[in-house]
Amino acid sequence: MKKVERINTIMRYINNRSYFTISEIMREFNISRSTAIRDIREIEAMGMPLEAEVGRAGGYSIINNSVLPSIHFTDNEVKALFIAFMASRNQQLPYLKSRQSLAEKLLGLIPENQQETLVLLNQILLFEGTNPNNPDLLDLSDLPHPMLEKLIQLLLLDSHLLITIKDGRVIKSYPIYLLHLYREKSLWQIEGFDLKEERRRVFPVDHLTNVKPYPTKKRVNKKKVLEILSKQEEAINLVIEFGPKAIAQFKKYHPLKFSISYTNPYQATAVLKTFIDINMPEELNDITNWLLFLGEDIKFKEVPEEVLESLQERLCLYCQ
């Protein structure tokens, strides 16, 4: 490991600890005592606030344990970060406004003669959702819901939230334990456990009008929530066997809650077992579209009649 890389790694290691010793650094990074001491002194010189404790068992504590000094990036690491920012354009990501300033700081990390490389990459590489005529253009549809950042800030502090949702003219508030915040089909969704009705709910972030911490004495944890939900799981009503072509399509896109189990050591065949709520027209329409997307390399072992009828209706339209 090169010296710069080792020092950066040591900084990340000790920044996550309130206390460490030279012996721990020696064992963790397989270096000598003199090398460990030199690296620690260099890290102190770079600005990391360390406080030495004298004595036989003495070590170092990090003041506030919250400062991570400047990290040296290699040329390839800067390219990797820059390309990651490029790929995230037009993805309705939170903190979108900060991305431009971050990209500019990345440019400033490398010498001026190498900045042209990143500018050239920006001109050559295009990703899904970008405007080929103006890749830097952000349409209004690219901007995330204004409540998304507030939601993320709060859930990092506590998963017990009170969210207010507007659906048409109806406004309702729900106390939830947040399970996941995810993006599917270009829409952000809140998956939460309703603390009053004790059941799973999914809310579109686009319908969110307010969110705040939910103070409650009856607090739950994720393990308890999952135990309750496991007892409420619906019976499986859709079982599909996949061939290699269908598996390839599945990897391109599949609903977030779906997962396949491979039935072949070479992952050439697989099976999907799940539940479809046939009483939800939108879910029935979505599963119909997805099954057609999978193609002919699937075999139904169990399927609701409503799903078959929906597929037949869609195929009849294509045949006309």
Image: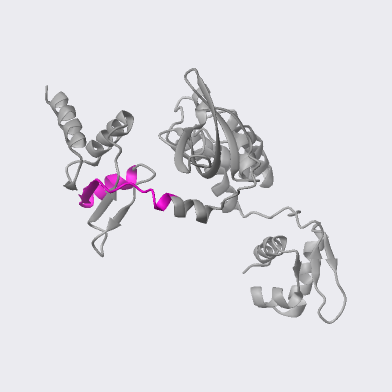
Horizontal relation, residue 119 to residue 9: left or right: left
Q: Position of residue 246 (x, y in %)?
A: 23, 47
Which is more toward the observer, 42 or 238? 238
Horizontal relation, residue 32 to residue 176: left or right: right
Q: Position of residue 65 (x, y in %)?
A: 76, 58
Q: Quadrant of the C terminus?
A: top left
Q: Quadrant of residue 52?
A: bottom right
Horizontal relation, residue 316 to residue 128: left or right: left
Q: Is residue 60 above or below residue 56?
A: above
Which is more toward the observer, 294 or 194? 194
Q: Residue furthest right?
A: 54
Q: Residue furthest top?
A: 169
Q: Which residues are magenta?
A: 229-253
* One can see residue 259 in this view: yes
Which is more toward the observer, 263 or 232? 232
Horizontal relation, residue 117 to residue 202: left or right: right
Q: Position of residue 305 (x, y in %)?
A: 17, 37
* One can see residue 138 in this view: no
Q: Position of residue 70 (x, y in %)?
A: 73, 52
Which is more toward the observer, 9 or 141? 141
The residue lying at 57 percent from left, 41 percent from top is 118
Q: Residue furthest bottom?
A: 56
Residue 239, magenta (yes or no): yes
Q: Is residue 309 above or below residue 237?
A: above
Residue 53, magenta (yes or no): no
